[in-house]
Image (spheres, grey):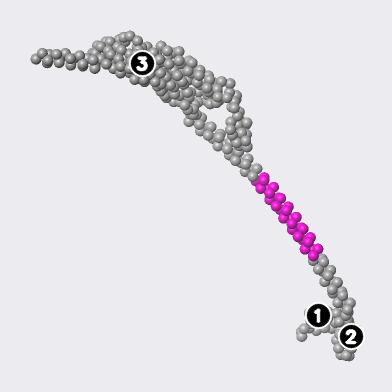
Amino acid sequence: MKLKLLLIPAIIILIAIFSGAYIIDETEQVIITQFGKAIGKAKKDPGLYFKIPVFQQANFFPKNLLEWDGDPGQVPTLDKTYIYVDTFARWKISDPLKFFETVNNVMGALARLDDIIDPAVRNFITSYPLIETVRNSNRELDIDEEGVGHAEEERPLGKVTTGREKITQGIMAQAQPKLVAFGIELVDVQIKRLNYVEQVRKSVYGRMIAERKQIAQKFRSEGEGEARIIEGNREKELLRITSEAYKVAQEKMGKADAESTMIYAQAYNQGPEFYTFLKSLDVYEKTMDKETSLLLSTDSDFLQFFKGYKTGEVK
């Protein structure tokens, strides 16, 4: 009976110890509250801790970096270009006690970040031209020398004096002091994405298409010009080759005709009467047949061989 009486208090004590103990790991920090009010300082070191059971409550908060992702919003730039801006930030709880007393939890902190970072982003985007938000410096872009480079020269967007990096730094500098009262430290703010609104995007795409068509037409014109030059050179070379070939052929034909004439002359000189006889026979064959009738005088040279044949003088 006495053992049972001792066992009950022991169990109660063990339950109280276990319910009053809590463990903090490396990614957590704790605020102890009693009846809803914070007691003491925040506990940030990892380890085993104890609290009064039932009356005290351990409130855990993350100690590592947390993410804030803003909603994309339509913002006009200083040069009246409407764009969608999507930003994100990294933050952490720097003072858990202030954090608990003001926003109470992470969801409340995100709502405060929306109220502070979004206006800061809008304020800086509207204060600078579009190129300041897009680029960090005036470094030359890695572009095609014969293509996009010429288009950029035709429509300069201006020079960068501030740049995107300094704009994000300015957003962070404007937002951070307002978050100190909530126990929040803003670690980084960045622009995740920029894009034109639908109406401006169509206009920009149309201008880009027109520029690319202009560049393509330029390339086509240059190609056609080169083709005409190549064809002209080909025709010129063809005429040169044909002319030289014709010259060589005429020279060879002239030499052949000269040799032929010389051979004929030599043959003619060796037997002029016989040559005359053969040529006359050839003429007779071509000009007369059984249907041919000739009316000639008796002293015509055309009939000299006929006369000689009758008188027997032909040799």
205 or 9: which is nearer to us?
A: 9
The answer to whether residue 196 is visible is yes
Neighbour tally class for label 1: few under 14, some 14-19, many 20 plus, Cα within 10 Å: few
The outermost residue toward the front is 3
Amino acid on which the number 3 mark rests in the picture: Asp
Instruction: List the residue tagged with mark 1.
Output: 282
Image quadrant containing the C terminus: bottom right
What is the x, y in percent for residue 154?
A: 62, 31
Earlier residue among tags 2 and 3: 3
Q: Residue at x 86, y 88 (%)?
A: 309
Question: In whole angstroms, how far apart are the C-alphas of marks 3 and 1?
Answer: 134 Å
**223 magenta-colored:** no
Helix, strand or loop at mark 1? helix
Instruction: List the residue tagged with mark 3.
Output: 45
In the displayed structure, 171 sits above or below 249; it is above
In the displayed structure, 254 sits above or below 5; it is below
The outermost residue toward the right is 299
45 or 253: which is nearer to us?
A: 45
Question: In whole angstroms, how far apart are the C-alphas of marks 2 and 3?
Answer: 153 Å
Q: Residue at x 82, y 66 (%)?
A: 255
In the rendering, which numbered label is found on residue 298? 2
Q: Based on the displayed image, in which of its 4 quarters is residue 247 positioned? A: bottom right
Earlier residue among tags 1 and 2: 1
- On screen, residue 183 versus residue 53, left or right, reads right
Magenta range is 224-252
Q: Based on the displayed image, in which of its 4 quarters is residue 219 positioned? A: top right
Image quadrant containing the N terminus: top left
The reply to whether discs 3 and 1 touch (Cβ–Cβ < 8 Å) is no
Q: Nearer the viewer, mark 3 or mark 1?
A: 3
Q: Nearer the viewer, mark 1 or mark 2?
A: 1
